[in-house]
Amino acid sequence: MSILSFRSGQLLTAQGAREEGSLHIAQGCIAAVDTLRESEDALDLQGGWLVPGFIDVQVNGGGGVLFNDAITVEGIRAIADAHRPFGTTGLLPTLISDSLTHVAAALDACEAAIEAGVPGILGVHIEGPFLNERRRGIHDQAFFRRIDEDAIALLTRPRKGKVLLTLAPELCAPQDIAQLVAGGVIVSAGHSDADYETTMAAVEAGLSGFTHLFNAMSPLHHRNPGMVGAAFDAPQTYTGLIADGAHVHPAALRLVLRARDKERVVLVTDAMPSVGAKDKNFVLQGKAIHVENGICLDDAGTLAGSDLDMAGAVRNLVRMAGADLADASVMASASPAGWLGLSDRGAIAPGQRADLVWLDADLQPRGVWQDGQLVAG
């Protein structure tokens, strides 16, 4: 057993904040949260915070690598390596709409990455191709198709990692969603023009979340609540939220914080290869994407994912939306863990993985631990 000790800062534990303390680590997990003894060599947090490691369920790329272009264990490792210094200790590599052949390859590659012990890989997010072209965003509609039994069989094949699927519920039957959920798939709605009633029927069938709330979905209207209205009216669901100031206006971020339980709001980055890369510009399925002031755009001005990292998302939620850091931490860790059904991640508490992030007084990441081992900083 090893001990990690911290002083001169706030440890945001599941039992509340504490000024100092020690974490007893055994086999990569927190065995106990203890008081700090004078004899212990403690890390000076310098007025910062120790928070649970971040979990990002929507990571398209990083370190100059786009998952669609590098559907391999090596590509996945490069993406995880790029996000780790920003506090991301768990993630789902995300495949943007592509052929079913590439969907199958993505499922297999993430499974292989888990088997190979690539740190932080929790499964895979398949975002499309079962989407509505009216809300396609940057996705290539040439790949769009209806879900069928072959696709369901592919997606529900037993795997070690989690499978999160984004689809447009108006383009499938509720029983399709129920079949996916029964097969272990976590189903989220996105890139959809579904009305309120169709969305709520999908929720009844087992749909449990909404991919990047507000973006690429039917908006809220007082006589036609749309998918956004359904998301607010289904408190048992999770809502992904891109807090970069471009995808969602700060005022809308504040409305989400007032209307939704923090444990059901999931901060995501929708990160592209630019995160952690020196050359920020990249190509997405033949389109040149330019990064301007941290925003990813194609030549037509369409948002193309983001240049956001998870530490930045937490920082933005605090500064733009006035969120309490403890609440923002929950949305970056415990909430995504809850959505994925992971009971051993997302908090600083006994029985949890010893995945930790040290944020300084400016909320910049200064140190990152996975399984109790310092891996960045």
Image (cartoon, rainbow, N blue to C red):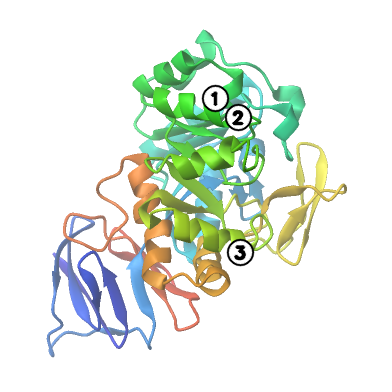
- The residue that disc 3 covers is 251
Mark 2 secondary-structure assignment = loop
CA separation in Å, label 3 and label 2: 24 Å
| Relative depth, front residue between 38 and 142 | 142
Q: Quadrant of residue 206?
A: top left
Seen at 82% across and 48% down, the residue is 298
| Relative depth, front residue between 182 and 50 | 182
| Relative depth, front residue between 367 and 232 | 232
Query: Can you say which quadrant of the picture contains the C terminus?
Result: bottom left
The reply to whether the C-beta atoms of the residues labelled 3 and 2 are less than 8 Å apart is no
Tell me if I can see residue 192 in this picture.
yes
CA separation in Å, label 1 and label 2: 5 Å
Query: Can you say which quadrant of the picture contains the N terminus?
Result: bottom left
Indicate which disc residue 198 carries: 1
Q: Residue furthest top?
A: 149
Residue 229 in the image: x percent, y percent?
55, 41
Seen at 50% across and 52% down, the residue is 80
